[in-house]
Amino acid sequence: MSLHKTNIGNNLTDTNIERFQNLVYSEDPDIVCVNETWLNEDIKNSEILHSGYDIFRNDRGSRGGGVLLAIRISSFKSVREIQHGHDLEISMAEITTTSNASLLICSCYRPPNSDHSWLDKFNNFMSDVCSQHSNIVLAGDFNMPRISWDSPEKTSGDFAGLQTSLECLNLDSLITTDDNINHDWQQWKKVFLEAPNPKRFWSLYKFNNKTRNIPQKLLVKVTETKRTSAGNPADIAALFNNYFTCIFTTDPNIENYSPDALAYQSNNTIIEDITLSEADVSSVLHNLDINKAQGPDGIPARLLKETARQIAPSLTALFNKSLNTGVLPCNWKLANVVPVHKKDNKEHVENYRPISLLSLISKALERCVFNKIKDHVFEQINNGQHGFVPRKSCVTQLIEVLEYIGRELDLGKQVDVIYLDMSKAFDRVSHMQLLKRLRDFGFGGNILNWFRSYLKDRRQQTTVLGATSSALPVTSGVPQGSILGPLLFLLYQNNLPNSINHSKIATFADDTKIYKVINAKADASAMENDLANFQTSSANANLLLNTDKSLERCVFNKIKDHVFEQINNGQHGFVPRKSCVTQLIEVLEYIGRELDLGKQVDVIYLDMSKAFDRVSHMQLLKRLRDFGFGGNILNWFRSYLKDRRQQTTVLGATSSALPVTSGVPQGSILGPLLFLLYQNNLPNSINHSKIATFADDTKIYKVINAKADASAMENDLANFQTSSANANLLLNTDKCKTLRITRKRNKIDHTFKLQDSALETKDCERDLGVWTSSTLTWSKQVLHQCAQANKSLGYIRRSTIKIKTISVRRTLYLTLVRSHLAYASQVWAPQTVDLIK
């Protein structure tokens, strides 16, 4: 067990965090104690150490002081924070070693101006601790000048020395004349990494292989659950890897692959060989992004970029040997995968996206190959494809499609659009079919053999919390995180649009839409035939359409206008051209006018409990009938709602499926629309007040001139509660609040009640993200938004010290800082004349 106590400069903020990370990730200690952290609650644990460590802090919250304790999770059976009731800057944790020994670790800081009372407190603390624990490690800064404390020195990268060392090595001689490129690669890597004195730069640029790309908070719930059942991070890594590889398909034909067996169906000039020059390789190395994470070989981009001139000749020889023999080194086919959370429940592995980290040297070779073949491939890519294509983008595709639709609408016509969703398209690419596509695109000889080797025998392993799973085979798909992967995918699915005969098609990688002018039923039938043909072609290419969402989107597009024109005008949620802001403007404009007249407006904020999950299916079908749906479509909605089930997957285990007997389907296309339709009649129960809704967020408001007005408003509240209960929608009384907005000295006080429970009256209430006060002033909103913006600004400043590109910094500012300042600013900080009025 290794323990590291450190004092990094004057604090653990700004650049010192990076220095601290470099030290920890290079020394790899089991326990780290830090004093004088200067941290506050705005700085998250994930900013200090990205993952692999449990962090316990005692922040002073102001300049100076503060202690931190970081314990590597994988080194111990369990780690538990211990609280103490003493007025001291101390963090403690109890660890249980693999041999079941218990040990208390304490990190302590004594301010230099402390008087004798500090020692009294410390003696009391030690008495308590020693009475409860036998084995104690105490580390800290006691600021006692007669005691000498050693401070670790930071080392810096000596690239000049490394470059000189490499120039003295004959790396070219490592590339032998035999065909064993795997042996050549291992020799090259060994000599390169054992160049004299590499540690002087290595400590700064060696990245931690223990999932440093995963914010630890993404795995908290998973690890907590796992510790109670298995208690081993290795099991979590295996769980993720098994899930990420389960979607691959097996194509046994690639084992019996022969270039001659591939039917050649193209008149293109065949590209059989690619030869790289030193200039080709050197240019790619010089243009490496030093911020890219390293792959399984542990070689960082900064190291390759700084030594590009010295290693380009030997790498050129190695790359050309790979291309000429048609063999890619096995180690370059291994991917390190880190899970990144996408959405929804963080305990479910299916809600994580795998991010693959490949060997940067392998990616350099890929970039060289890409540069040689890109023009040949792009000139054959279908013109409707806008993804990964030079001078095309999401915007160019949208302009092309919407310009066409706009012209047809100007002529008074109807255009139907079908949005298609492919399931895991990049991962389902058949390697054998991809090789056939490459042959059709004019590739043959050594380069086709090289592509076969590039695809064959790939493996991936997942790293989580310091543990790495065993490597599992990748039997289909284009390599994630690779340079060639997107190009190969475009090439693979390039023929799919040929199945469309009567409609138009537009694609952005795997995102596809089919659209057509509909003048008669026959046009719709022709479009449906195109859809069927596209589905068949996709299935033949092993690409499966997610029909549930595609069908829902089609139904939504057909019924949305019919539904929205009947939705209550006070509803602003999920409604076109309405939003939180439009609702706030409408309500607050009304309240503002009444306040200017010296009046009082009472507002009741209502909270519905699990509203989307409590929708009665029978009542929803009745609402659909009332909205004008019948016949087959009403039967379809009945089937859509009936016999739904859900199962939960966590830690590799899947529960049995249980029935979903109420609610609109979460994550669906139609769910929000059905909810609006379901609760559309609730505002009809309000007779004396006004009502505004955003989905299930509801507020009732009224001018109060006398007690009778308050009583009328309370009657409206009771009627609304009754109507909601009849619809199986329950109000959460504890979370319902009232706000009395007025500038009058003599307020009309009234305690509103709901089901005999008095509602709390607030001085300020957060309404759709905006703090609204009882005097309709915005000081709390301004302070809150500025605090959020400053917190994000501090995060950017601490985390992007090396990013100098103005465009990147501007994007970060607009996304993470200005978004806080701009949210609903039309309400609390209007800038235009019409809004100010």
Image (cartoon, rainbow, N blue to C red):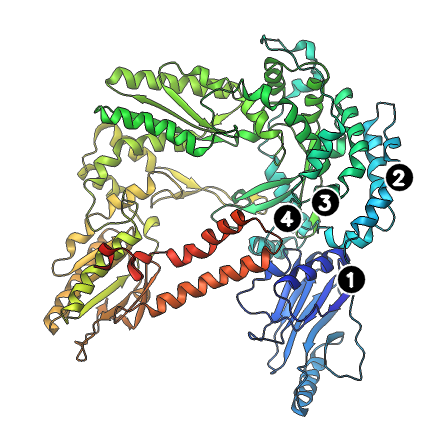
Give the Cα separation between the discs numbered 3 and 1. 36 Å
Indicate the secondary structure of the residue bearing disc 1: loop
The reply to whether discs 4 and 2 touch (Cβ–Cβ < 8 Å) is no
Amino acid carrying label 2: it is: Leu
Please state which amino acid type lies under the numbered disc 1.
Ser
Judging by the rendered image, the residue that carries numbered circle 1 is 99
Residue 643 x, y percent position in the rendering = 37, 37
Tell me the CA gap for discs 4 and 3. 26 Å
SS assignment at label 3: loop
Instruction: Find numbered disc 2 in the image and state the secondary structure of the residue it sits on.
Output: loop
Q: Answer few, some or many: residues within 10 Å of disc 3's Cα (few below 14, many 20 plus, some between 14 and 19).
A: many
- Mark 4 or 2, which is nearer the eye? 2
Looking at the image, is mark 1 or mark 2 earlier in the sequence? 1
Q: Residues within 10 Å of mark 1 (few under 14, many from 20)?
A: few
Residue type beneath disc 3: Pro
**Residue wearing tag 3:** 300
Q: Which residue is mark 4?
A: 236
Graded by Cα atoms within 10 Å as few (under 14), some (14 to 19) or many (20 or more), the crowding at tag 4 reads many
